[in-house]
Image (cartoon, rainbow, N blue to C red):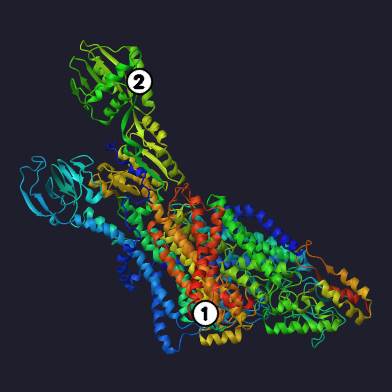
Amino acid sequence: MSAARTHLRTAGVAVRSMLLLTAVLGVGYPLVITGIGQVALPNQANGSTVSVDGETIGSRLIGQSFSDADGNPLPEWFQPRPSAAGDGYDAGASSGSNLGPENPDLIAAIEERRAEIADVNGVDPEEVPADAVTASSSGVDPHISPEYALLQVPRVAAERGLTEAGVRSVVEANIQDRDLGYLGERTVNVLRLNVALAAMGG
Amino acid sequence: MTTITTAPPARSETSHPDTPRKTSDAFGAAALGEALPGAFRKLDPRRMWRNPVMFIVEVGAVLTTVIAIAEPFLGGPDASGGSTIPASFTWGIAIWLWLTVLFANLAESVAEGRGKAQADSLRRTRTSTIAHRVTTYDETADPSAAEAEISDLSSAELGLGDVVVITAGELVPGDGDIVWGIASIDESAITGESAPVVRESGGDRSAVTGGTRVLSDRIVVRITSKPGETFVDRMITLVEGASRQKTPNEIALHVLLASLSIIFVVVTLTINPIASSVGAEASVPVLVALLVCLIPTTIGALLSAIGIAGMDRLVQHNVLAMSGRAVEAAGDVTTLLLDKTGTITYGNRQASAFVRLAGVDEQSLIRAAALSSRADPTPEGTSIVDLATRQGIQVGELTTGEVVPFTAQTRMSGLDQPDGTRIRKGAGSAVIAWIEQETRVDDSVRADLDEQIDRISRSGGTPLVVAVLSPGGDGRILGVVHLKDVVKDGLKERFAELRSMGIRTMMITGDNPRTAQAIAAEAGVDGYLAEATPEDKMELIKKEQAGGKLVAMTGDGTNDAPALAQADVGVAMNTGTSAAKEAGNMVDLDSDPTKLIDIVAIGKQLLITRGALTTFSIANDIAKYFAIIPAMFAGVFPGLTVLNIMGLHSPASAVLSAIIFNAIVIIALIPLALRGVKYRPLSASAVLSRNLLVYGLGGVIAPFIGIKLIDVVVSLIPGF
Amino acid sequence: MEILFVVLQLGTLALILALLYRPLGEYMARIYTSKKHLAVERGFYRLIGVDSATEQTWQAYMRGVLWFSGIGVVVLYLLQRFQAVLPYSLGLPAVPEGLSFNTAASFVTNTNWQSYSPELTLGYTVQMAGLAVQNFVSAAVGIAVAIALVRGIARSRAATIGNFWVDLTRGTLRLLLPISVLSALVLLAGGVIQNFNGFTEITTLSGGAQTLPGGPVASQEAIKNLGTNGGGFFNVNASHPFENPTAWTSLLQIVLMLMIPFSLPRTFGRLVGDDRQGYAILAVMATFYMASALILTSLERAGIGTAPELAGGALEGKEQRFGIFASTLFGATSTLTSTGAVNSMHDSYTALGGMIPMLNMMLGEIAPGGVGSGLYGLLILAIIAVFVAGLLVGRTPEYLGKKIGPTQITLASLYILVMPILVLTGTALSFAIPGIRDDVESTSIWNPGNHGLSEVLYAFTSASNNNGSAFAGLTANTPWLNTALGLAVLFGRFIPIVFVLALAGSFAIQDKVPVTAGTMPTHRPLFAGLLVGVTLIVTALTFFPVLTLGPLAEGLL
């Protein structure tokens, strides 16, 4: 009897505190952060979008594919890493491949990608860097390694009828060093690189 | 409160827990042979159940045996984890599992066997004897029961409160207190000490124990124990370990070992379902082997032997613990209360100097002091004569004159010589009063005397004033004998050791604070309680305990009983009253108060031994894993052979070797379990690092070597 | 050169944590010992109807924890079931029953195991009012339980161990909320989004279509790390650029995960009145942390395995901006703190590298572990270590003046038993029951062979330890795994908590044994080393056989 009442009392306190905390933490807190974000940091808060001629063409943080409707890479654009998100760079369904190190599918895919990239870019398969043949974690990785970007320079230049030196300098201008010089890896943002490339004309 | 006892045997300073006084064949072939039948009897699952770790091994042994019997009919042993298993493998595992269980039982039997021998000799003293019961005892009218009606009956029929008469040559029929008389008693049946002891009514040495023999005189004894519950009965049950209850630490350790075993049972049971997903199931004998190797069998097998042996070690020190809990508590003690007299000092004051007053010839002082003491049989008196002799003054054997003995009224003793000269020695005030009956004491003499008395008192000594009164009534104070408490040798070092172990020593004395302080400083104790009454002692214990400390003390008097009961470890002297023996949780048959220190060491040793073997047992798992796991699955996953860092011959030999090691290590450690890990009085950090190194690191390394060596032998067996 | 980057990265982290250790630890000590209530707290206590001045026995404290968490499960379950009618649900339907149960259990227990893909399953209201709230309060509950245990140790002859509602409120309002606000804003500045835009259709540079997600991510990201919860706003968790856009935000998130668990030893030291005891606990945590991070990093760097060797590096499932070092440090941190967030896919780690996150969890989440749970987990192991070592010095073992007797050892042993039993039986049952086995092998497991076994083992390890990370190839949204893992997270959280609180009560009522030279010191390197050894043997060794069948068999080909 009294034990039941004790429990009932505790349950009451639990319900009331849960409701109150939900109001503070689940409604108040995110709204305050959203308010500050929208006022003080609207670009970041809304996804660091990139616009060309007033049109939003993507986010500098979210990788996008440069392929045709059938999924074939468009050779005139710098190509991002393989993606396991949806049909590739589906930002509505982020995903890694989750394939294990001994998974035959992954082994086959890596071999295939290496051969294809070597073939398309006219290089020795040995020269293809690791990031070019492996799917990222998010499936929307916006970056590639400087090595992979530079490897694509001759192909892109040839496709666009630009000089290799010109394209290479755009790539080099888009190489981002590690944060603080030692955090993470050196990267090239594919969307920004391609926006700069598009600005070159050709 | 100062209890004066005769100087105890000095052996306590030399005896140590590692050197049992009574030799017993700890681990001889004979002891093994005697223990073997017991080891087999203990295989009864109803008994094994109480030791969950070994019960699991027994179940595994049964299971493996059944499989070994069935295998030939089922087409030989199953392959395990992709490796083929030789036909003799299952039998090998089964046999060694049975041996593992037997070894564990053997350890317990051997430990019990040692107690049994002691119990048997005790039992012989219990043979019933004829008791002469006083039908109606009247303590005021006829305390000696000389006139009373006596009826004879068997000692087994004696009840609580009965009064019996015992005369020289008879056995004491039961435990009791002497209500009238004095007798010398042979207690060797219980204490092993052949010299007779004196017991008398009143005071703190009135207790007699059933089974001991009265050698002289006639005493009247009131029985204080019920039949079957006598001291000897309790001793027998204790040394036999029949009523041995698990101590708190033992229970805790059992819980920990049981949980580890449960985890490893789960590990083993889940292996095959999980392994089935990759087609690497192990055979049942291999799984049983893995389980037995992982559960802490070493400590599980030896735990009860360690406990029994710990109690046994106390018995060998002639100490009876009423419970295992008390032994463990002894290891935890943080404060030792030690009676000054008999424990810290030799129990009697000795003359250390003759201090003459101004204008007195030293020779005459010494002569007077010696003369007045020559007929004085007390240790003080003897020591004065000895000191005089050493200083070249011989007073000869001749007794001329009348000896005046010490009385509580006069507080003096001395000699009245034939020529009328009277010599007295005694307390300052008494001697002055005596002189001043005849003549006045000079103020300057008095000042001089007071100064000397004061000086001696301050240093913790006892001043004994010597004075002479000539026949003509000419009184003269000659000087002072400096009596000093003599602190036993080596105690200061012993107390320093205790201090480093984290144990404080407190000296209890009836002396005044000044004397107490001086002796405390000389003995190197950490504190003292002066002018102590039993109530003060009780207060002190309670105060210490309130701060979370554990207190150990010794006592013998009836008025010690409450304090003995209050103390966490109360050691009653066998010479003491039965009230004291009832109140304490240990009885020292040698009545040696210094033994408290040994008891503490034995308590610690018991815990250390358990801890050491637990550590060793668990540390062994690492090597066993590396022996068995690669062997289990390497058949399916050859890459796992890199984990076979011992390079064991084959999966079958690896598993069998691990099991054999597991069994042999039990046998190898039985002596250590019985003897106990050597305890060194060091700080906890030092003890920990040493024991961790030996039993932790040793426990990691030893099985790697052991299993490898066994594997070399096992690999010679055809098929392995 | 690369080694230098690893060292610099670890050095930066160590420096930040070292600078936080004393102020944060002492701040937390003040939070949980202060007699004063803030005005807002007093209002809060009035509203929920508790007397903040009254302390509770361990039973009453436990009632509070269990009722509060139970109500949390119900509320979160209902929110998901009624998602369709909630605002800002992005048109998503109600979450199915099994998944709702699993998710509710998972977030209330500070696990944040996600059997679902958030952007396809949950709208903003459930994320904010359901998940984010539990992110706060489950963390506050964890710290409260740890503090209750420490109080029990610190007190003597006391019947009570504090007031749960006060501890919950203070932990939330004084500790978690302010740091979350601050760090959410920093993350925002780094590019983490915070909006209610829903999905935005855009035309890409090359003319394709792309759907960009929106959402209140920054506010959630901050507390998800700070409270060692780990539940991602997006499917790929902290590898999603909107959750974790740069290498420095990644380091910030690592700091957030570690700051409370690594500073709690200071709080512990303060409360028991001996800072050295805190350093000893910290040393054990740091030893495991450093060793784990370095081993994982070198294994991934070595890239042993067919696929990584073929690709020229273990970059499958890793983001280019993080590379290997920022991925492995995050992975080690997340699995050692019971957070379970990931910025790389553990399923695609090398076989031996993938074993390290598992081992991290199998240690029992104690290095430094989840907020609160890490401290109480390690203190339980310390009790076991003290018991064995205490016997070795010849005294009834005691820890910080408290005797470790049968009651304490029983409770500590029961605590230790829970996790391995859950992990091993859960994994074994997945393969032992034929119907379930078929389902697990055909539906759930993604990679073939030993790796598939590892996925199931990882799942149960993660759930039972309330971590929440996964070998994410595993399809866990099945009746068996939703149920089994849901139960594993609940049992793995609350059964140990009951034992911890009972232990707190048993300590509080005890007298304190004074420290003497005979007391085994528990602040010296020797004891810290012993604790490391006991932890390894008691926990990790238990899993040696299954690890052999999973990652070791896969990696030692």
Residue C305 percent across, percent down from the top left: 68, 77
Q: The N terminus of chain B lies in which quarter of the figure?
A: top left
Is residue A133 at all visible to an observer of this figure?
Answer: yes
Mark number displayed over residue A60: none
Task: Give the vertical position of C364 relative to C271 (above or below).
Answer: below
Task: Give the vertical position of C321 relative to B568 (above or below).
Answer: below
In terms of secondary structure, where does tag 1 sit?
Answer: helix
Mark number displayed over residue B355: 2
Q: Which of B593 and C115 is in front in this view?
A: B593
Task: Give the vertical position of A94 relative to B200 (above or below).
Answer: below
Residue A59 percent across, percent down from the top left: 79, 74
Q: Which of C235 and A7 is in front in this view?
A: C235
In the picture of the structure, the residue carrying the numbered disc 1 is C428
Residue B466 percent across, percent down from the top left: 28, 20
Kind of residue at badge 1: Ala
Do marks 1 and 2 share a chain? no
Q: Residues within 10 Å of mark 2 (few under 14, many from 20)?
A: many
Is residue C419 at all visible to an observer of this figure?
Answer: no
Kind of residue at badge 2: Val
Q: Report in which chain the residue with disc 1 lies.
A: C
Label 1 to label 2: alpha-carbon separation: 91 Å
Q: Report in which chain the residue with disc 2 lies.
A: B
In terms of secondary structure, where does tag 2 sit?
Answer: strand
- B147 vs B315, left or right, is left
Q: Nearer the viewer, residue C353 or B122?
A: B122
Residue B77 percent across, percent down from the top left: 46, 85
Q: How crowded is mark 1: few (under 14 residues within 10 Å), some or many (20 or more)?
A: many
